[in-house]
Image: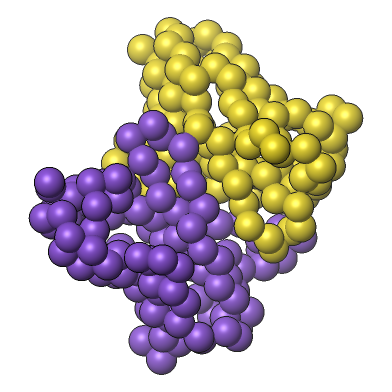
């Protein structure tokens, strides 16, 4: 069974540009989460999808971040326009049930210069 | 608010030594879940264990064991006879109901374990 996959593994963009990160959860997992870790800080929750619906987006830092999960399969996280403080590693996770084990992807390292 | 503290930033041990990684958590919820994840140099977070707040039984899985003590709000992780492959960053995490239909994870800052051959 394939695990959670994320693309790209690394992205370097300039301040003001747009970047879109993609996450493919484990097949059959209705729950999809986004987290990020900025340098020297803890891994922080961004939002949670149940199928295609945003269940909890309390961790989204501001309206420059837009997450979608059309069709309840893969998800995208767009940052527009990117700022220097957005640099970090963005993790995606999925789980079968809401309070269940969350399986993480390898992360996307975003560098904004 | 929830909080997870991993006081040990970095630990170095010699191969075959035992090592314990500490985790202290804070929450007012009576129902919660505790996790440990391993992050090897490749970067992905590997699930190790999930415990719920009503199950204080200690667990052993091979060389790994976990000691959950509600009285001290701790969920410590011990590796017995450490090996070089155990070198990684280990994260402790807490999950409670967010009130918005979600169980988001709150992570500690992680402990970097280096096992020296």
Q: Which color scheme does this rendered protein use? A: by chain
Q: Residue drawn at (12%, 47%), measured in percent from left and top?
A: B116
The reply, left or right, for residue B85 in relation to residue A44 is left
Identity of the residue drawn at 78% across and 37% down: A27
Front residue of this view, candidates B86 and B110 = B86
In-image side of A77 versus A13 (left or right): right
| Residue drawn where x is 50% and y is 31% of the image | A107
Q: Quadrant of residue A28?
A: top right
Question: Residue drawn 62% across and 52% down?
Answer: A102
Determine the colour of chain A: yellow
Q: Residue furthest bottom?
A: B71
Q: Against B39, is B80 above or below?
A: below
Which hue belongs to chain B? Answer: purple
- Front-most of A27 and B93? A27
Vertical placement of B112 versus A39: above or below?
below
| Left or right placement of residue B98 versus residue B7 in this view | right
With respect to residue B15, does B98 lie above or below? below
For residue A100, side relative to residue A113 (left or right): right
Counting every numbered tag in the picture gives 0
- Is A46 above or below relative to B82? above
């Amino acid at each position: 069974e394939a695990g959670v996959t994320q693309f790209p593994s690394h992205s370097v963009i300039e301040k003001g540009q747009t970047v879109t990160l993609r996450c493919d959860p484990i097949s059959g997992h209705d729950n999809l989460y986004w987290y990020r870790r900025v340098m020297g800080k803890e891994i922080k929750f961004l939002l949670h999808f149940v199928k295609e619906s945003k269940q909890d987006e309390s961790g989204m830092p501001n309206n420059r971040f837009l997450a979608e999960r059309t069709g309840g399969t893969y998800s995208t996280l767009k940052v527009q326009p990117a700022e220097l403080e957005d640099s970090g590693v963005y993790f995606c996770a999925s789980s079968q049930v809401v309070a269940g084990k969350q399986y993480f992807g390898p992360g996307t390292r975003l560098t904004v210069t | 608010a929830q909080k997870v503290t991993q006081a040990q930033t970095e630990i170095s041990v010699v191969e075959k030594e035992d090592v314990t990684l500490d985790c202290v958590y804070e929450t007012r919820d009576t129902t919660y879940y505790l996790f440990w994840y391993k992050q090897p140099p490749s970067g992905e977070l590997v699930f190790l264990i999930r415990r719920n707040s009503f199950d204080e039984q200690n667990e052993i899985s091979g060389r790994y064991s976990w000691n959950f003590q509600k009285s001290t709000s701790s969920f410590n992780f011990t590796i017995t006879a450490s090996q070089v492959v155990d070198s990684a960053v280990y994260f402790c995490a807490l999950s409670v109901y967010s009130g918005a239909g979600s169980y988001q994870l709150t992570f500690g800052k992680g402990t970097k374990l280096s096992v020296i051959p």
